[in-house]
Amino acid sequence: MLSVIVAVLLVAGLVTAVARNDADVATVAPTSTTSALVPAGGDTTTTTAASPSEFDQAVAELEAFVAEARGLSFKRRVKVTLLDDAAFRARLKEESDVDREELAKTTKILRALDLIEEDVDLEAAQAALLGDAVLGYYDYEKDELVVRGAGLTPGVRQTLVHELTHALQDQHFELDRPELEDRDDEASSAFSGLVEGDARRIEGEYRETLSRAEQRQAERQTSSAQIDPDVPRVLLESLAFPYIFGPDFVDEVMDEGGEARLNEAFATPPTTSEHILHPEKYLRGEEPKEVTEPAADGEVFDRGVVGEFWLALILGDDVSGADLRRAINGWGGDRYVAWDAEGRSCVRATFDMDTQRDNDELRAVLRKWADKHDGATVTGAATAPVTVTSCR
């Protein structure tokens, strides 16, 4: 969904609602989080009293800030469209490319892993979440920035900086990377961590230029709407991943070699959630292990990589603290398959951690998890990689 846009979400509300547990994995409390109305400038469709020239000037000033802060020059002006809330939601829905076949597969996998309830309509939940959470987005096919709201407030300018950073990234590094989208691993989501981490860094630098009063005003403005509390927590957590962990990843890359090293990262981006969660592994060139795909007990309808972050999401409701940290740290590589059997969907994943001790620790934690979930089993010899199967 939203395969050609880079969105900015709940920059204050969602991100500050996400807490890190002892294992350094994002968990989002299933309570209301907040969104914002985000106006903009440039080539503008607007219902505000501000004149087009005022918006043009504001965008030009923010473009100059982004260019200086990022150390790159805009190659062309960015079109900016401002829409009120209803028009923005309609445009977002129109731009959303819902692959219902893939969504159906995802629904079965999440149910098999007990991550969503049986009656959850994932398409409706995802549409509701994005409608509430997306503040604005950059469409890299149209080279256009689309935002919602009215008025050149501090919150508006802050969000514009985030999206203009995406436009600048696209002009220099090309954000449209179908070769990543077509892979069956974590390369696409890891790239998002780099892209969003960079944009949040520049946004943060802009926020520091605001007065305390303006910062408080921006905080209020980005905490003005609520997300449907019925949206599954797993959707909140997965959506928040690049915004939460991307900034720390980018900071580590910058510490390694400044903007030059960051620019190199766009040429050779991270490929796993482990890279984003543990930037030192990316920086030293550590790649995931080649893991043999487990055998399925039926016709496979999906296959791919779970990854460290999603392993934490699977375990997170039942395992916490030191146990969760022991389970996920030392992720080396994995492969999963999914199939249907006797009216149920099944997922089987094989994990091969960095060391045998890491495998033993994961095996012990997965057994505790399986004890709490009907239809889940853990197999594999004591000296072999760990295989877990879950059917629902």
Image (spheres, helix red, strand yellow):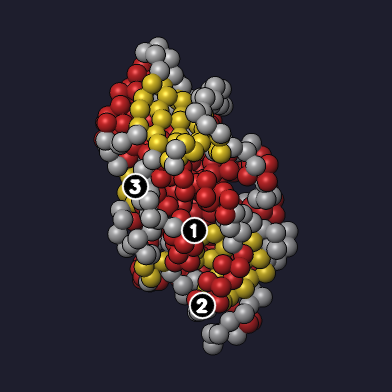
The answer to which of 233 and 355 lies nearer the viewer is: 233
Give the alpha-carbon distance from disc 2 to disc 1, as whole Å: 20 Å
| Amino acid carrying mark 2 in the image | Ala
Quadrant placement of the C terminus: top left
Q: Secondary structure at mark 1?
A: helix
Look at label 1 and name its amino acid: Glu
Dots 3, 2 in contact, CB < 8 A: no
| Residue bearing mark 1 | 123
Quadrant of image for the N terminus: bottom right
Residue 282 appears in the figure = yes
| Residue 321 rendering spot, x and y as whole percentages | 26, 35
Select label 3 or label 1 by which is in front: 1
Coordinates of residue 197 in the picture (x, y in percent): 51, 48
Residue at image position (31%, 31%) is 370
Residue sitting at x 38%, y 58%: 231
Real-space CA distance between mark 3 and mark 2, rounded to the nearest whole angstrom: 30 Å
